Image: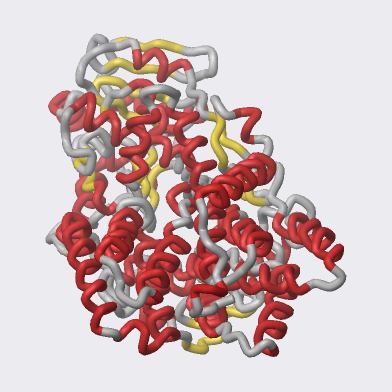
Amino acid sequence: MCASRPEQRVPIGFRDLGAAAVLYTFITAVATWPLLLHFRDRVPGAEWWHSQKFLPESLINLWNLWWFRYALLELGQDPFDGTYILHPFGANLWFHTLAPLHGLIGIVLQTFVSLTVTQNLMLLFDLVMAGVCTFALALHLGLGRAPALVAGGIYAFSPTVFAHLFAGHYELIATYWLPAMLLSFLRLIDLPVPRPWDAAVLGLLFVGAAYSSQYYCVYGVELLIVAAIVRGRRTLRPATLRAFAVTAVIVLIGWGPLLWAFMGASAPRLDAGGEAFADFDHHSGDGIGFFVPPFTHPLLAEPLGATHERLNPPGCYPQETTTYVGWVVLGLALLGAVARWRAREPLRLLLAVALVFSVLSLGSHLRIVGGMTGIPLPGLLLEQLPLLRLARAPGRHIVVAMLGFAMLAAAGWHQLRPSWLRWPALAFLALDFAAMPVPTVSTEVGPVYRRLAEIPGDFAVLEVPLSVRDGHVGAGVADNRQIFAQTVHQHRIVSGQVSRLPQEKWQALVDAPIIGTLLRPDWANAQTLRRDRAEGPAFLSRWAIDAVVVQASARGTAWERYVESVLPIHSRERFADGTQLLWLRGP
């Protein structure tokens, strides 16, 4: 393991990779159960966490896939120009988790299958590929085929991955970029004379990660820095540096559009005094979180509910603070490290990856059982660096640490004697990592949206209550189904959710008549209502906001009374679920 001599490595053949893919496909089907039973009408995501309402981003990511295809093929426009949401102001989707690489793949798949099936297929592919890429990396590092398979399973199906699956963070399920990057890097520096093709592959991996999950692109840079430091002189050979120059050129060309967008005048700004900047502390792991089974565990989540509450104080979210490594993994990793160390086989790389990224997952200051100790951590440096500080959830570093732990644990598993102990160890590992049944979110929509789909024309839809959110701020009533419903009716909407929304956009929304009042009803007063009655109808007419959906939850409330008193209603339609569709002009 970690051997630098090629003869100690197991050759990586297509047959081995294919067999690994078959195994991980089976494990994926079991680990995500009962998703296969609802493949056409549901996607993974938890809508409740203990007794709290949880808002997974599952439907947002479905909208991402739909919008990328709809913008390119139906509208013939730039998909990063979000003109169909937050109408009439729109949004710059360069700052949103649009995952354009996923969008391109989704264009092909949606030609043959539905949007829901497309998303589920991509999720299963991500999990299988994470296992396969880790398996290939383990073979390169000198593990045998059996322990390499174990390493791939530990990494691909770790609790941190399923925590994000529960939260609907689908772009973060594509963890295969990290082992693929490290494997490509090690192959490059281990060759006596690096080949341009290997350098190009490394560059393309970084470009692909940037357009799939920007977090993993950033973490890939950090991972290779750690690997370069550990490997030392090998990375400084003239031939290796020339190869890295090829990689750098490809990366700069590929990253060009992203860098241009993020350095532009309209890019979101985060400053040291801003509320969002404090996320480095809020969205980080807890010191004891490495040892506490996660909120996704089917047996232990409820008994540990009070502990999870303490690990997630106000402003924290369980998917961001899940840093559980696993008791079985920790025990096996310790056994693997000791056994290999005694055999004089250096483990510096994997130990460095496991330990460095575990520390980085704790954020800027150490938190213990939910309480801030004030002890500074290396994350303080990351939050001072341009662009890197936009990666505001340092707890996600644990996925990189799991790459090191998975390799060490697999080596320890192989050291178990007698060998029959390996099977009970795998059984305990499966129980430790269990997350079944995986909760799912329905992709069915109400009859009002199917009715809107029947109406032609370029008009916009206003929802009551209204929902607008970004990664930091929410206004109105949080409801991801409003933006998802657009995938069915395909009309412009005033609602919307993006990852980053500049302050000037928020201000325009809040200042707009009627829209601003629906977003901030607590700010409404007699003067606001007079303005809405005087200016609102002309504003809505000018921007073709002709349809108003009044949800059943708003019936008989101040929301409905406000709408009835302010809007010039032309006609109305009622639906069996209690929803109303108000037309401000004839449909």
The correct choice, above or below, for 64 with respect to 313 in the image is above
From where the camera sits, is residue 534 visible? no
Q: Quadrant of residue 33?
A: top right
From where the camera sits, is residue 337 visible? yes
In the displayed structure, does residue 42 sit left or right of residue 273?
A: right
Q: Position of residue 224 (x, y in %)?
A: 39, 74
In the displayed structure, does residue 499 sit left or right of residue 93?
A: right
The correct choice, above or below, for 178 with respect to 376 in the image is above
Q: Tell me which residue sits at (22%, 32%) in the image.
A: 72
Q: Quadrant of residue 440?
A: top right
Tell me the quadrant of the picture where the N terminus can be found.
bottom right
Along the viewing direction, whichever of 429 and 514 lies nearer the viewer: 429
In the displayed structure, does residue 399 sit left or right of residue 420?
A: left
Along the viewing direction, whichever of 7 and 69 lies nearer the viewer: 7
The correct choice, above or below, for 44 with respect to 580 in the image is below
Q: Tell me which residue sits at (12%, 61%) in the image.
A: 265
Q: Tell me which residue sits at (44%, 66%) in the image.
A: 183
In the displayed structure, does residue 228 sit left or right of residue 502?
A: right
Q: Tell me which residue sits at (48%, 57%) in the image.
A: 175
Q: Position of residue 221 (x, y in %)?
A: 35, 71
Tell me the quadrant of the picture where the C terminus can be found.
top left
